[in-house]
Image (cartoon, grey):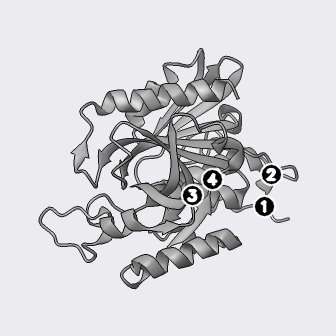
Amino acid sequence: MQPIAASELIINERGAVYHLDLRPEELATTVITVGDPGRVPQVSKYFDTIEVKRQHREFVSHTGTLGKKRLTVISSGIGTDNIDIVLNEIDALVNIDFETRIIKENLTTLNILRVGTSGSLQRDIPVDSLVAATHGLGLDNLLHYYRLEHNEEEKQLLQSFCTQTQIQAQMSQPYISSASPSLLKHFVKDFFHGITVTCPGFYGPQGRVLRLGVKNPQLINNLTQFIFGQHRITNFEMETSGIYGLGRLLGHHCLSLNTIVANRVSKEFTKDGKASVENLVKKTLEILSNC
């Protein structure tokens, strides 16, 4: 096997991967991703110990322990373009030998959990409630650059989604990937389950109209009304599909957890976003520390 070239895997002068500025020993095997760099200390303040604090650009990382579990919390920034960086680099930290630049023979599987905010697409999922995504359905194009193959259920879901919404006529072909069952099973009580749609922007791509008209004014209605068997779309945001798709290809267990800060059907917004996020953080850490 040929070593990976320096131009492809960039390692800085302290032996850390370029964007995250983390060395292999500084990453735990359970990783929490948050969008906002300011949310990293909001999570790590509950750790019993913090052994590593690193920051490069929008990527802030804290690694420490909670009880007997070692955890890393990393800020990804917004969007699947940043998820491409975060997922590939955390995988490189555990599965590529930085000395030889060769992929390791024995690969490590990470548990990766997104903890973030989201907009509800169902009237019965109110603001400040919690959602665990059974699937990430991408309206972005990140996974079109990789060799993602859908299983039979995913193919049927996508076909039904495209037939019902006709969304592929106005934007790139959607893709879909499933959550890790081994993680999802721990997040049942107090969580709604459903499909999380990932959009490549916050305004037009999520159907918001300020000064610009949108190409698909029926987007919210089409997403809200979609149903396939027991599946429905619960919410949308900007990272989940990238995490699920790349995580699956790289062999990691991934789960996206969201607190609802806006309900796009009832047009409501949370009165206390900080408390809403705090509730999700505390619940996530409580569950993780016991599983």
The residue where tag 4 is placed is 179
Q: Nearer the viewer, mark 1 or mark 4?
A: 4
Give the residue at mark 3: 135
Q: Given contact means CB atoms under 8 Å apart, are the residues at marks 2 and 1 in contact?
A: yes
The quarter of the picture where the N terminus appears is bottom right
User: How many numbered tags mark residues here?
Assistant: 4
Q: Is residue 37 above or below residue 12?
A: above
* Label located before the other in sequence (1 or 3): 1
| Residue 62 picture quarter | top right
Please state, as top left, top right, bottom left or bottom right, where the C terminus lies in the image: top right
- Residue 170 image position (x, y, % from top left): 36, 81
**Kind of residue sitting beneath label 3:** His
Viewer-proximal residue among 7 and 185: 185
Residues 2 and 30: in front is 30
**Sequence order check: which comes first, mark 2 or mark 4?**
2
- At horizontal 51% and vertical 64% (from top left) the residue drawn is 137
The furthest residue to the top = 48
Q: Are marks 4 and 3 in contact (CB under 8 Å)?
A: yes
Which residue is labeled 2 in the image? 100
